[in-house]
């Protein structure tokens, strides 16, 4: 019984520590340019925007529903942080056969 109790208590602690490490790893600041509205897609908060990511080997561009209104200007240079879309976040829905950039949550946005 003692082994079972130890195992059942250690599993949630492992999950919490793994999640905490991911948050730190995703705190990188990215630089980019707002490229376009993704008009063939939509979401509960409106039309997603495509952001070209500069100087990153893994990301070329991303799509987001969380770009603040004051940065929704095509060609605007911004800096921002990103995180993956979670189960409680809004998802974009595309109505045509396009290959959209990866959807992410953009936060801490400011002008570059």
Image: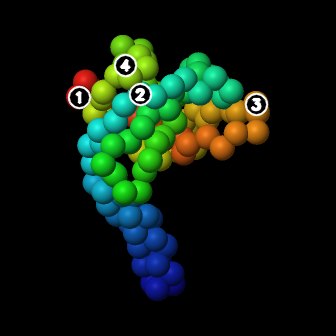
- Seen from the viewer's position, the closer of residues 62 and 19 is 62
Q: Secondary structure at mark 2?
A: strand
x and y percentages locating residue 19 in the rendered image: 39, 58
Q: CA distance from mark 4 to mark 3?
A: 25 Å
Q: Secondary structure at mark 4?
A: helix
Question: In the rendered image, which residue does mark 1 sit on?
Answer: 112
Closer to the chain start, of discs 1 and 4, is: 4
Tag on residue 34?
2
Q: Is residue 27 visible?
A: no
Question: In the rendered image, which residue does mark 3 sit on?
Answer: 95
Question: In the rendered image, which residue does mark 4 sit on?
Answer: 71
* Mark 4 neighbour class, 10 Å CA radius: few under 14, some 14 to 19, many 20 or more: some
Q: Is residue 91 visible?
A: yes
Mark 4 touching mark 2, by CB under 8 A?
yes
Residue at x-position 28% and y-position 54%: 24
Q: What residue occupies the far top of the structure in this picture?
A: 70
């Amino acid at each position: 019984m003692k082994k079972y109790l130890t195992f059942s208590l250690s599993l949630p602690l492992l999950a919490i520590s793994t999640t905490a490490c991911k948050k730190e790893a995703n705190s990188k600041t990215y630089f980019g340019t707002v490229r376009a509205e993704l008009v063939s897609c939509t979401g509960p908060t409106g039309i997603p925007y495509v952001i070209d990511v500069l100087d990153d080997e893994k990301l070329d561009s991303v799509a987001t529903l969380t770009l603040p209104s004051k940065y929704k200007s095509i060609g605007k240079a911004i800096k921002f942080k990103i995180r993956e879309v979670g189960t409680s976040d809004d998802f974009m829905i595309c109505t045509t056969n396009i290959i959209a950039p990866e959807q992410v949550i953009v936060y801490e946005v400011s002008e570059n």
